[in-house]
Amino acid sequence: MKQYKELYIKICVEFCRLLIGSVFVFSGTVKAIDPVGGAIKINDYLIAFGLDVFKPLSTLLSFNLSALEFTLGICIFFGIYRKYAAILTFLFMSGMTVLTLYLALFDPVSDCGCFGDAIILTNWQTFYKNVVLLIASVAILFYNTRLSSWYTFKAYWVVTVFSFIFCSFFAYANYSHLPVIDFRPYKVGANIRQLMEIPEGAPQDEYKYAFIYEKNGVEKEFSLDSLPDSTWTFVKENNVLLKKGYTPPVSSFNIYDKEGVDVTSSILENDEGVFLLISPDLRNAYDFKIDEINSVYDYARDRGMMFWGVTCSDEEAIQHWYDNTGAEYEFLNADDVLLKTIIRSNPGLVLLKEGKILGKWHYNDIPSEDNMVSVFDALLNNSAGVSVESSFPLMYVFTFSVTLLLIWIYDYFRNRKRGVVEKKNL
């Protein structure tokens, strides 16, 4: 009987190990794919809790949070530093469970951002997910010595340090360029006009309509089908959303000129091609690629194409940009959340044709004057679009996996074959 009990505990603990390890590795990875988005979400938290003074640290926190989650997930998954990893996991999940309960109750931030833009969860869904992971972390905490370890203790530090450095480097690569995977609606190849459409027959929002009327000092609620006579005085209307209808991937895409006129249609319906130089905040925009940007403007002007700057900055910031860069193009205005969602670069370049995104470039990757003609002409002629994603994600997965395998092979023949035993307190 005792043997079956031990087997049952072993199976449960190993399942918890795989569950927590996989979730942490996935969470850390998607955060590292979009560290700018992570910094934006951290800013939301800091503002919600009145900690605006720490906003300059948001990018650094984003990098470290992704690397910490990823590394902790690797340690749990492969049974590395089992005792310490179990303690850290339990502490981390305890804090996150309390935090997400607060978010679910008071909703200071719309979603926790635990999986970036890859998987959007409501605050209550996040809380329930964290409760499951917290329970699993308790099991690992009490039975950490029963976790299988893929490496000997002599290789623990190598795998741990390598995992942290690799994830940090991966995050920096995505920060210095565009994310290798774009989880947002405005990915290359997407047609913004189509993403704004609501399909025929799509579910509509369902409301419960209630109307408050007053008579002789007494207020009473009436439904839409049973409104009172004229002797009652209307007070207010209380509508409750019963069921959310279909929401298009792009629910709001509005760009205005300096006079406040909506010019969205002229941009999305243009069949010649439109360049948008997007900068949510011109005061903090990187301005060392001005020659490349101005060359793109010259390319557009020579071909009769539109070239607009788009920002939410004020006139003073726009004029400062003109003075510093000698820019000749005009600026349009849009909401900063929309601009940050379209491209994770300040500034960033977007090429549209008939509402379809043909290309997006981080300021570090804007084509040089020597090759921009071939790049832009190819995109405009075939309208296929070019994506940063391609095979890069597989390259990172392959590099990380092969390195771990090589460490395991060395560790196996160098240590395990020689009888190096595991240290139980690790």
Image (cartoon, rainbow, N blue to C red):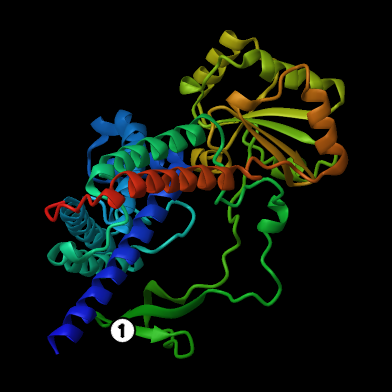
Residue 258 or 98: which is nearer the viewer? 98
* Left or right of residue 243, residue 372 in this image: right
x, y percent for residue 130: 27, 64
Q: Is residue 37 visible?
A: no
- In the picture of the structure, the residue carrying the numbered disc 1 is 220
Q: Residue at x 44, y 37 (%)?
A: 171
In the picture, measured across the screen, residue 242 lies left or right of residue 137, that is right
| Residue drawn at point x = 43 percent, y = 88 percent | 229
Closer-to-camera residue (400/360): 400
- Total residue callouts: 1
| Image: 145 above or below 403 | below
- Where disc 1 sits, the SS reads strand
Residue at the extreme front of the image, as rendered: 418
Q: Where is residue 10 shown, x and y percent of the image? A: 23, 74
Residue 198, position as x, y percentages in the image = 66, 66
Q: Is residue 420 left or right of residue 391?
A: left
Mark 1 nearby-residue class (10 Å; few <14, some 14–19, many ≥20): some
Question: Which residue corresponds to the image point at 16% horizontal and 62% vertical from the top-left?
Answer: 145
The answer, for residue 4, to whether it is visible in the render is yes
Q: Amino acid at mark 1?
A: Lys
Q: Where residue 156 sits in the image (x, y, percent)?
A: 26, 45
* Quadrant of image for the N terminus: bottom left
Name the foreground residue: 170 vs 203.
170
* Nearer to me, 57 or 264: 57
